[in-house]
Amino acid sequence: MSWLGQGVDRAGKIAWIVALALLVIAPFVGVYPIFIAQALCFAIFAMAFNLLLGYTGLLSFGHAAFFGGAAYITAWLLQEKHVTPEVALLGGVAAAGLTGLVIGAIAIRRQGIYFAMVTLALAYMLSFFFLEASFTGGENGIQGVERGRLFGMIPLDNDLSLYFFVLLVFVGIFALVLRIVHSPYGQVLKAIRENEPRAISLGYNVDRYKLLAFVLSASIAGLGGALKVLVLHLATLQDVRWEQSGEVILMTLLGGLGTFAGPVVGAFIVIGLQNFLSDRAGSWTGVIIGCIFVACVVAFRKGVVGELLAWHKRRTKKA
């Protein structure tokens, strides 16, 4: 089993063990834990998108609806209903999953660009709903959300406690995606991605497989958005707008589509650049990141991790 992507086994495992060790010690060596926690939330979001596009071949332009929708529901449950964080997170994920079921049932009837346009249109409708709904705060969003106590015991107001909770969830989601992709179900998803007519001829109900993949992806994306509320204390319209969907596409392609490490690396690159450039470039931050993305797509079409895997494969063949 490969932990880094396709074709790397032992080296990939070592890389992930080292990466996990670095994440564990990072808050103790001067790295701001909230920054890493934010990046991990978006890494979960990117992993969800990669499960849909990288392993199923379905390009969604509306995944922000699940990320931001779960953020709004989680923030509302915490601020208005005063539930515990774990209940609020489950509520956000459930809302994202149900929304994914409805949107997926409509969208999977189409393929290619038509599928993408349906997801974009439905997500745009949802963003308008969150703008106009009475409980979302309109353009101001829901701000000042209290984190509360996890299971009534662990105070998440402590940044370090929150960070390790987010890290634990991230590791669990990574393991879940890894298991899904390497399961018989995951192999069918890859078959659908490579040749859907052949998968149909083999007797698979591809619509059912694609719908389940869509719901799983929506639920995991919702978890990323729900966790982001705990990290940043707010849910805003930016979370549900189509630009957020574009951002997760950027993260996935920049890191490496169809690789396990790619979405994570891409999320850290994008969030890191946004934090680094926000005080230095101001409104030009988006332009600079866009230029970097174009340069990477032209020079590294497989993404950062994809190019590393390709280089490793060529070196192994020569050896």
Image (spheres, rainbow, N blue to C red):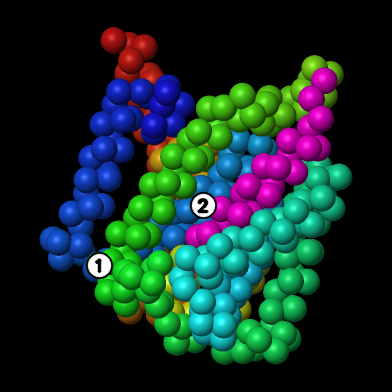
Magenta range: 203-226
Task: Identify the residue at image location x=69%, y=79%.
Answer: 130
Q: Residues within 10 Å of mark 2 (few under 14, many from 20)?
A: many
Q: Residues within 10 Å of mark 1 (few under 14, many from 20)?
A: some
Residue 71 sits in which quadrant? bottom right
Q: Main secondary structure of the magenta part?
A: helix
Using the rendered image of the protein, determine whether residue 68 is visible from the camera's viewpoint: no
Going by the numbered disc 2, the residue's amino acid type is: Ala
Specify whether residue 212 is painted magenta.
Answer: yes
Task: Identify the residue at image location x=32%, y=18%.
Answer: 315
Where is 239 relative to 134, above or below? above
Label of residue 46 in the image: 2
Where is 301 relative to 184, above or below? below
Residue 254: x and y in percent read 47, 48
Residue assigned mark 1: 160
**Quadrant containing the C terminus in the rendered view:** top left
Task: Identify the residue at image location x=56%, y=49%.
Answer: 48
Task: Identify the residue at image location x=56%, y=62%.
Answer: 90
Q: Nearer the viewer, residue 299 or 116?
A: 116
**Element on which disc 2 rests:** helix
Horizontal side of 314 relative to 75 (left or right) equals left
